Amino acid sequence: MNRIDRMFSQIRKGKEAALIPFITTGDPDIATTEKLILEMARQGADLIELGLPFSDPLADGPTIQASSQRALRHNINARDLFGMVRKVRKKTDIPLVLMGYYNPLLQYGLSAFAEDAAASGLDGTIIPDLPMEEAGKWIAAVKTRGLDNILLVAPNTSADRVRKIARVTQGFLYYVSVTGITGARAELPAELYQGLNAIKQLTKKPVAVGFGISMPNQISRLAVVTDGIIVGSAIIKLIEAHTIKEGDDLRAGPDLVKKVGEFVGELKEATKKGG
Amino acid sequence: MNKSPNQKNTKSPDNSGHFGPYGGRFVPETLMPAITELDSAYRKARRDTGFKRDLDHILKHYVGRPTPLYEAKGLQKAVSQGIRVFLKREDLAHTGAHKINNTIGQVLLAKRMGKTRIIAETGAGQHGVATATAAALMGLKCEVYMGRKDMVRQVMNVFRMELTGAKVIPVLSGTQTLKDAINETIRDWVTNVGDTHYVIGSVVGPHPYPMMVRNFQSVIGRETRRQIRRLAGRLPDVVMACVGGGSNAMGIFYPFIKDPGIRLIGVEAAGKGIGTDLHSATLSVGRPGVLHGAMSYLLQDHWGQIKGAHSLAPGLDYPGVGPEHSIFKDSGKVEYAAVDDEQAFQAFKLLSETDGIIPALESAHAVAYLKELAPSLPPKSIVVVNLSGRGDKDVATVAELIRERADK
């Protein structure tokens, strides 16, 4: 049983949902990313998604696009991410999953990427532009190395296709809450709860929901129907607000890590209210 | 490439949209139902005589097809004695470029599918204008994404789109040019996938787009075959076209792809030189990778970040290329060359002077390479150049270049 499986089996024993924050590696700099991982883990995050910045993030809204661009100012690449994870892995056992677009993996070399990701202490990958049909080579590369490749389903995915994807996904199934791109939304679609219930009928694997979720009250409602809740843009916005810009230079403000930690703590509390 | 697949009796692309190692469907899960639906609707429409009749009717009476194949005697004299040069006059198609062949086909298909809203990306504005025009013709709502930088460079095309009732949405992200306009259009499509059809403007994107756009554009090559037989009594020795995404080139090459002995030459934009960072010569110096839903040659850095492209011709200013061009490069079926901004500029002036035809700067790249190639061709060679668009949109750019030089 790997870290992700262990985490979800524990979550399912208690009456709560896993809180899964997303941050972009290297936004505003890589030292801050390392501190954020440790602080978010301390505040109750159950799994952390680490974005590998990409020049053309076509599944992302303006908030995460801007975050990627900030990270790319320092030319953050996969090797930097692995190095950082290796360091942080000595201090925490929280499951860490890389979220990145396919081309940077492909250029690194799929086998080498899987090898280095596993060796650094990462637990899995989420690749939003790699649907099941194209994922064969990547899944083969991660399988022997103990990494999970987590697949996504969307509200417009047919039941038949959900079943197929659920069979192939490892770790958990990522349910995209809206037909759309990432980014905080004041209101989640009413069909979301029904949609999640339907998905839960189709698979026994853990299901985590993401895209658009930003507020504790949304989380407490969702915690009843899902195993995990992913929050990205709302956290990125907070990072952005506490980043100091001096000319072309970006650096973390004095309260950045503390403020993000507090927010994550608040979100985690909300995951418990449902049960 | 390790293995080049035997294409003789295999389908290209295969059912999942792969041209050998290229193509495919690298898209967010939310788009999978949409492209699967599009694929099956397109396959059905292709076999439907009603659809074919409607399409042919519009192409003939509205677009003005067939476009002429014209023997450019002036240009012929200027580049080499003893060869014959024919221009396929896509510049004479409605809206001034080959783009309309594809947009009419796709909007007609979208209407059959019950979609009520059309979206498109545009770089120079030619595809945006062609999409807005087709949408106006068929009474569908149309929105076009265009990089803010391109909107400034191509004011006239922005106005043409607005006149035909389209809304032009400025793209402020990334490079603010074509690449980011495509990202933004995909994001719109992911969000409004139920009622919206995305009209991609080239032989790029996830399956079925590269195949579908190729087929709609193949009318160029089919007409050329008929016309050259009539005019010259035989098939040509060389067929040339410029390549950005590669739709006009694919359109004229594809009907000749099985003829042995015909040289097919795609001409990319070398911009300020392929040794610099300012060019769009994707096939000449790029590496395979995944962008905008397909595996193909790309301009990218060591880590797989996509690089900005450059060309004097805005329609070639793209860091990717169609996946089928990638397999044609590997298999050697098509030769790819590149000419720089200066050569294209000179060819633009040349054709204007020799034959009274002002070519688009994109098409001028093909003319420029003809100039290089002509002296090495055997006498009596027959060459067809696809003149993919007219140069009205580029007159201001070229006038400025001429003024700059006069000042020096």
Image: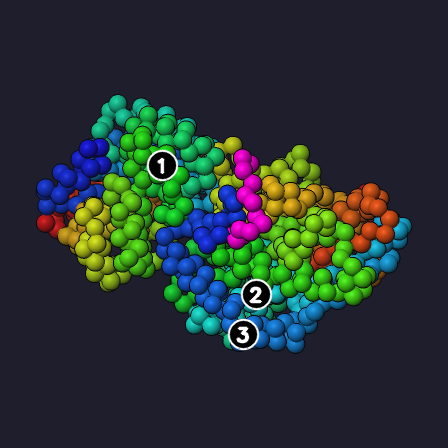
Bounds of the magenta span? B1-13
Q: Position of residue A174 (x, y in %)?
A: 28, 48
Q: In this view, does A171 lie to the left or right of B401?
A: left
Identify the residue at horizontal 28%, vertical 31% (top origin): A146
Q: How far apart are marks 3 and 1 (CA)?
A: 45 Å
Mark 2–mark 1 CB contact (< 8 Å): no
Using the image, determine if residue B368 lies above or below residue B39.
Answer: above
Q: Which of B295 and A12 is in front in this view?
A: B295
Callout in the foreground (2, 3): 3
The three-letter code of the residue at mark 1 reads Ala
| Sequence order check, earlier mark of 2 and 3 | 3
Name the mark nearer the viewer: 3 or 1: 3
Measure how far apart labels 2 and 1 are at the Cα level: 40 Å
Residue A10 pos. (x, y %): 13, 38
Disc 3 residue crowd, few under 14, some 14–19, many 20+, Cα 10 Å: few
List the residue tagged with mark 3. B49
Vertical side of B133 occupied by A29: above or below: above
**Residue assigned mark 1:** A140
Q: Is residue B11 part of the magenta span, yes or no?
A: yes
Pointers 2 and 3 within a single chain? yes
Report whether A236 appears left or right of A71: left
Q: Residue B137 is drawn in which quadrant?
A: bottom right
Q: Horizontal and vertical percent for residue A3?
A: 22, 33
